[in-house]
C-alpha cells in the first residue's frame, strides 16, 4: 500500500520510532493520526511536523480497551477514513531474571505489549476491511524470535505479537488488507527511560554488539517494507543477522546473545 493520500494511525507517536514514523509518513504524503499516552510528546511531534490538519493528535492509553474502541470515531471524524495502522507503542522490562520479576512487571508486559496491540487491532480492523486498500503493521522485536536473557517476559509478549500478526496475515490473504510484522534490533531510542527502566552500565545509544540504528533510518525501513507489502520487516543489520542465525543454529544464537548481555543481568 503506497502511503500517499492514505490515513495512517501510529501508536507511540510521541517519541522514538513512533515519532519518526509519523514524520516520515507525512513526508510521503499520508495523513496521520498520532496516538500516545503523553500529551507533551505528541505536542513535540506536532511542532516538528508542522503538518496542519494532516496530523491529528490523540492522547490514549492502549491498555484502556474502552478508550481504544472509541478511537476510530475520533480519527474518522478528523480524517474521514482510516487506511492503515502501525502498532508501535510498547515498553521493555527491567533487565531482571524471570525468577526475580514481580507480577506487576509481568502484567505490564502483557497488558501494554500484547493487549495494547490487540485492542488497537480489534478497534480498527473492521474499518480497514471496508477500505479499497489497507494495511496493518505490528511492531514485535528481535526479542520476539530470539531469547534475550533479562527480557524474557518482554520477549514472550513480543513473540505473541509476531505469531498474532502472522496468523492475521493468513486470515486476511483473500482481502485487500496487507499485514506486516516489524522486527527491530537495536534502535537508538529512549525506550528504557520511557518504560521507567534504569539499565546500569548501558547507554541505550551504545547498546548491543552492533551500533544501534538511528530512529529515522528505522522508520524509513519500516515504511519501505509496508509499501512493498512485506510480511517480515527486519529493522537493522543485527535483526537480519540474528533472524538467520536463529533459524540455522538456534542454540548457538541464543548463547551468543546471552554472553553479550550477561553484564546487564542483576546477580
Image (cartoon, rainbow, N blue to C red):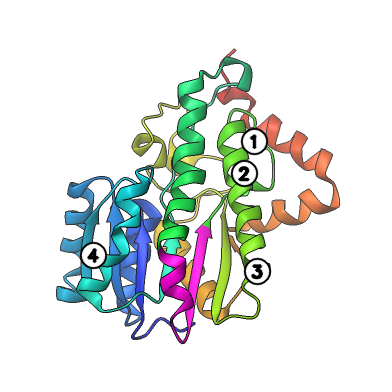
Q: Residues within 10 Å of mark 1 (few under 14, many from 20)?
A: many
**Outermost residue toward the top in this view:** 267
State the SS at label 1.
loop
State the SS at label 2.
helix
Residue holding disc 1: 148
> Mark 4 and 3 residues: CB-CB less than 8 Å, in contact?
no
State the SS at label 3.
helix
Q: Earlier in the sequence, mark 1 or mark 2?
A: 2
Of discs 1 and 4, which sits in the foreground? Answer: 4
Q: Residue 143: name its quadrant.
A: top right
Q: Earlier in the sequence, mark 3 or mark 2?
A: 2
State the SS at label 4.
helix
> Mark 4 and 2 residues: CB-CB less than 8 Å, in contact?
no
Answer above or below: position of 193 versus 249: above
Q: Residue at x 62, y 47 (%)?
A: 160
Of discs 4 and 2, which sits in the foreground? Answer: 4
Label 4, label 2: how many angstroms apart (C-alpha)?
A: 33 Å
Answer above or below: position of 140 versus 22: above
Q: Residue 257: name its quadrant.
A: top right
> Mark 1 and 2 residues: CB-CB less than 8 Å, in contact?
yes
Residue in front for this viewpoint, 125 or 228: 125
Residue holding disc 2: 143
Label 1, label 2: how many angstroms apart (C-alpha)?
A: 6 Å
* Image x and y of residue 190, in percent: 37, 42
* Image x and y of residue 233, in percent: 59, 65
Residue holding disc 3: 171
* Image x and y of residue 114, in percent: 52, 45
Q: Earlier in the sequence, mark 1 or mark 3?
A: 1
On-image quarter of the C terminus: top right
Q: Is residue 231 visible?
A: no
Give the residues drawn in magenta, as a range.
124-138
Amino acid at each position: 500500500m503506497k502511503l500517499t493520500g492514505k490515513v495512517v494511525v501510529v501508536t507511540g507517536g510521541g517519541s522514538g520510532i513512533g515519532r519518526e514514523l509519523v514524520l516520515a509518513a507525512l513526508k510521503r504524503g499520508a495523513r496521520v493520526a498520532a496516538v500516545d499516552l503523553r500529551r507533551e510528546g505528541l505536542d513535540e511531534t506536532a511542532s516538528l511536523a508542522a503538518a496542519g490538519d494532516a496530523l491529528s493528535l490523540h492522547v490514549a492509553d492502549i491498555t484502556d480497551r474502552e478508550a481504544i474502541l472509541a478511537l476510530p470515531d475520533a480519527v474518522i471524524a478528523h480524517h474521514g477514513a482510516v487506511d492503515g495502522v502501525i502498532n508501535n507503542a510498547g515498553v521493555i522490562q527491567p533487565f531482571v531474571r524471570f525468577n526475580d520479576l514481580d507480577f506487576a512487571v509481568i502484567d505490564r508486559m502483557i497488558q501494554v505489549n500484547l493487549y495494547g496491540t490487540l485492542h488497537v487491532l480489534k478497534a480498527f480492523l473492521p474499518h480497514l476491511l471496508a477500505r479499497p486498500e489497507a494495511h496493518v503493521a505490528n511492531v514485535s522485536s528481535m526479542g520476539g524470535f530470539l531469547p534475550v536473557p533479562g527480557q524474557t517476559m518482554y520477549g514472550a509478549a513480543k513473540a505473541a505479537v509476531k505469531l498474532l500478526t502472522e496468523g492475521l496475515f493468513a486470515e486476511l490473504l483473500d482481502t485487500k488488507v496487507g499485514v506486516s510484522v516489524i522486527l527491530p534490533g537495536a534502535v537508538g531510542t529512549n525506550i528504557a527511560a520511557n518504560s521507567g527502566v534504569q539499565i546500569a552500565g548501558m547507554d541505550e545509544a551504545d547498546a548491543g554488539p552492533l551500533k544501534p540504528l538511528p530512529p529515522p533510518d528505522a522508520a524509513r525501513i519500516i515504511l519501505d517494507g509496508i509499501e512493498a507489502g512485506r510480511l517480515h520487516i527486519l529493522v537493522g543489520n543485527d535483526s537480519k543477522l540474528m533472524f538467520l542465525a536463529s533459524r540455522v543454529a538456534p542454540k548457538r544464537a541464543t548463547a551468543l546473545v546471552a554472553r553479550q548481555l550477561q553484564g546487564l543481568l542483576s546477580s
